[in-house]
Image (cartoon, helix red, strand yellow):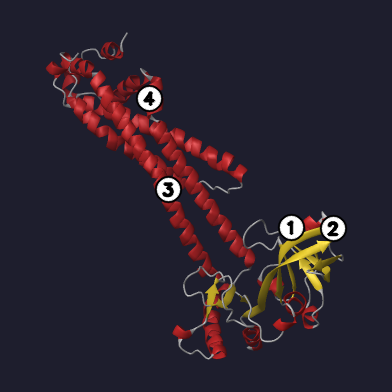
Amino acid sequence: MTSEAAGTARLPALPARRRRRGLGPLEIARVAGRGLTTNVVRSLLTTLGIVIGVASVVALTSVGAGVTADITANLQSLGTNLLTVRAQTDGRGIGLVRSGGTQTVTLEDARAIRASGDPRVAGVAPTVAAGATLKVGRENLPVQVTGSWADFATVRNADTAYGTFFSPLDVERANRVIVLGHGVAEDLFGAPERAVGAEVTVNGVRFTIVGVVEPKGDSFFSLDDSAVVPLPTFLTRIQGPDAIGDTGVDAVYVAATDADALAPLKRDLEVLMAQQHGTPDPADYDFEIQNQADTLDSLNQITATLTLFLGAIAGISLLVGGIGIMNIMLVSVTERTREIGLRKALGAKPRDVLGQFLAESVFLSVGGGVLGVAVGLGLALGLLPLFGLNAIPTVSSILVAFAFAAAVGVFFGFYPARRAARLDPVASLRHE
């Protein structure tokens, strides 16, 4: 039996009262469902574009949400209530120090901030960093070594898992002590707890390991793959004797006592730094002070824009899928012209035909949307983590993708349905 004959056999003549009022929603849905099941393979292939589009939207927005969560966690691991004083970046960065740029923020600035005695300041830690090679026995490991004050442990949340952080006395005496990141200690000693008390050579200078920092995870901001030494020791033993004196630093971290103190403390630090640099006009500032929340907002805006961009690219797949649905529906209308003519001859109204074909289009898009959400969640929760991507599906992205898929079905299905509804019954019955 052909699809046309099958469709006609399912549509007996309607009673006079039913002919006047037409088919109800459930009857239209049932007829549309039967129309789609007459060619299951073609129906499934028609939904493929929608499946790919919805799955892409769900997976890519999940990756965006995961990246945002990672950045937030990493920034918070830097320390809470944190202000960062750096050299002016001329608006060309997002708060990161320009590589090789002039360091206009100096140790003298850090000393002035500490000497101000502001009760809202919980800690001050100037930092200078450089690449160095750590050697234990025959093991050589290139890492980033940071020189700082003892307050580094407070302002950067560098709590030690084993041993202790170096003390202010170690800084004052420029002792050759070092605190290793968790990953560095693991690479050099196998078990991080074995590192405490051992000796390590940094660029040929012997240091005693006094502590190992708690693991912070693998990220740009993590201390796991670095080491920290007292700042004077760094300047004299690693950077060289010429660095002694009023030295430029990469940054000065200032921890506030609480979040409410951040904004007024930032304003007062700007005044203090302006006095230090003799630049009362803000336009002449050669430094900038960043609030941790401002940095987080900037990064979140970047990731949100990136997520929107990726979502828009995935949305194009949905439009292509919608065009595929319209194409197949137009073919279906042509193939079933005689069936449409017979249905109208048996009492079906144009709105019944319109509803049936529109329902078929919506069923295809909604069905594709359901499959797409399932595939997208599978990618986000199953496949992407295998490649080290943290994907967090969000209800809003799933609902938006699903609603967009349904709208695509209505939009691209309306024209074929309208074309079917407007067919002349007599001409349709003569169609070969």
Secondary structure under tag 2 reads loop
**Does any portion of residue 15 appear in the rendered image?**
no
Nearest to viewer (mark 2 / mark 1): 2
- Give the crowd class for mark 1: few <14, some 14-19, many >=20 residues within 10 Å: many
Marks 1 and 4 sit apart, C-alpha to C-alpha, by 53 Å
In the picture, measured across the screen, residue 365 lies left or right of residue 171, that is left
Q: Amino acid at mark 4?
A: Ser
- Nearer to us of marks 4 and 2 is 2
Give the amino acid at mark 3: Gly
Asked if the residue at tag 3 contacts the one at tag 1, i.e. Cβ–Cβ closer than 8 Å, the answer is: no
Mark 2 or mark 3: whose residue is earlier in sequence: 2
Residue at label 3? Answer: 311
Instruction: Work out whether mark 4 precedes mark 3 in sequence or the reverse, and give the earlier one.
Output: 4
Which label is found at residue 183?
A: 1
Dot placed on the residue nearer the N-terminal end, 4 or 2: 4
Residue depicted at x 47% and y 38%: 373
- The quadrant holding residue 337 is top left
